Image (cartoon, rainbow, N blue to C red):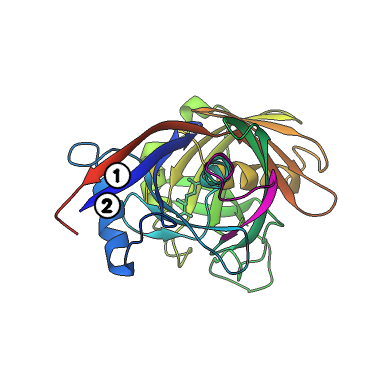
Amino acid sequence: MEIPFTKMHGLGNSYIYVDLFKYPLTEEQLVPLAIEVADVNTGIGSDGLILIQPSEVAEVGMRIFNKDGSEGKTCGNGLRCVAKYAYENGLVTTSTFSIETKAGNVTAEVHGTKVHVEEVTVDMGAPRLNRKMIPMEGEDNETVIAESFQVSLHPLQVTAVSMGNPHAIFFVEAIEKAPLYELGPVITADQRFPEGVNVEFVEIISATEMHFRVWERGSGVTQACGTGACAAVVAAILNDYASKNEEITVHLSGGDLFINWAEDGHVWMRGKAERTLDGVFFTNRI
Ligand SMILES: N[C@H](CCC[C@H](N)C(=O)O)C(=O)O
């Protein structure tokens, strides 16, 4: 097989994008293809695979597969790159349009021209805060804010937020001392999260600024996580470290995202989307 692709990234959170308008794939090919393209040695190297596809309920559709082949429900950095691609490649004709994900539809607004979209703003919708929606074990309608969460010998406090995908946020004094590599892989598979969880460590700098690191479900440590940054801002506000209706700067390893949990209850994310290369992936293994 010779599969045309585009590699794009949001703050270094890179995916291999296949345009199903041009090159259809079968359902059976998706998981093995995601694992293959993500491999830096025998594939292309990325945090996973993203499909750009027709939709019956939005202008364009997106599906995301993590590096291990597991399918995520949505992807903030991926949404910005899909919006950039759709506008630059004429899949959409307006600068504001809807994108279908498995977590529901979102609205994206591209900033730039049809030749080059520099930045994208996405209305990520409202966060889901009760245990049933995270999902997290316990009473369905309870929220999880600064709850004791013992992990091996570490007495932590977790705040759980879903942006359509699950996030466990832990506030730390110093981001460089966050136990990301030690506890990320343990927490992501913790039984208290029946569908697994994306794990974020956050250091509050001020009411409008924070440091952020992430161990992503299905991909491990990535340079950035858009839904995670949204969840971290929601968690900061729930813990009274920040306020609604303010643009909060989130410093991720790969750069900054600007997040606002607005009075309308929606979380707005603004940040870059960049194209690395177009190419053809040769494989006879799927
Ligand atoms: N690992 C995530 C999907 C990718 C999300 C992240 N890359 C983003 O930008 O939001 C999950 O399994 O829920």
Marks 1 and 2 in Cβ contact (< 8 Å): yes
| Residue extent of the magenta highlight | 87-100
Give the number of callouts: 2
Of the pair 244 and 76, the residue shown nearer to us: 76
Instruction: Name the residue carrying label 1.
Output: 38
Q: Secondary structure at mark 1?
A: helix
Residue at 75% x, 44% y is 237
Which quadrant holds residue 173?
A: top right
Residue 83 image position (x, y, % from top left): 58, 45
Q: Give, as a three-letter code, the residue at label 2.
A: Ile
- Residue that numbered label 2 is attached to: 35
Residue that lies at the very extreme toward the left in this rendered image: 284
The residue that appears at 53% across and 56% down in the rendered structure is 74
For label 2, the crowd category at 10 Å Cα-Cα, with few meaning under 14, some 14 to 19 and many 20 or more, is many
**At 56% from the left edge and 46% from the top edge, which residue is drawn?**
90
Query: With 265 as the anchor, is 117 left or right in this view?
Result: left
What label sits on residue 210 in the rendered view? none
Helix, strand, or loop for circle 2?
A: helix
Q: Is residue 265 visible?
A: yes
Q: CA distance from mark 1 to mark 2?
A: 5 Å
Percent of width and height locating residue 100: 58, 61
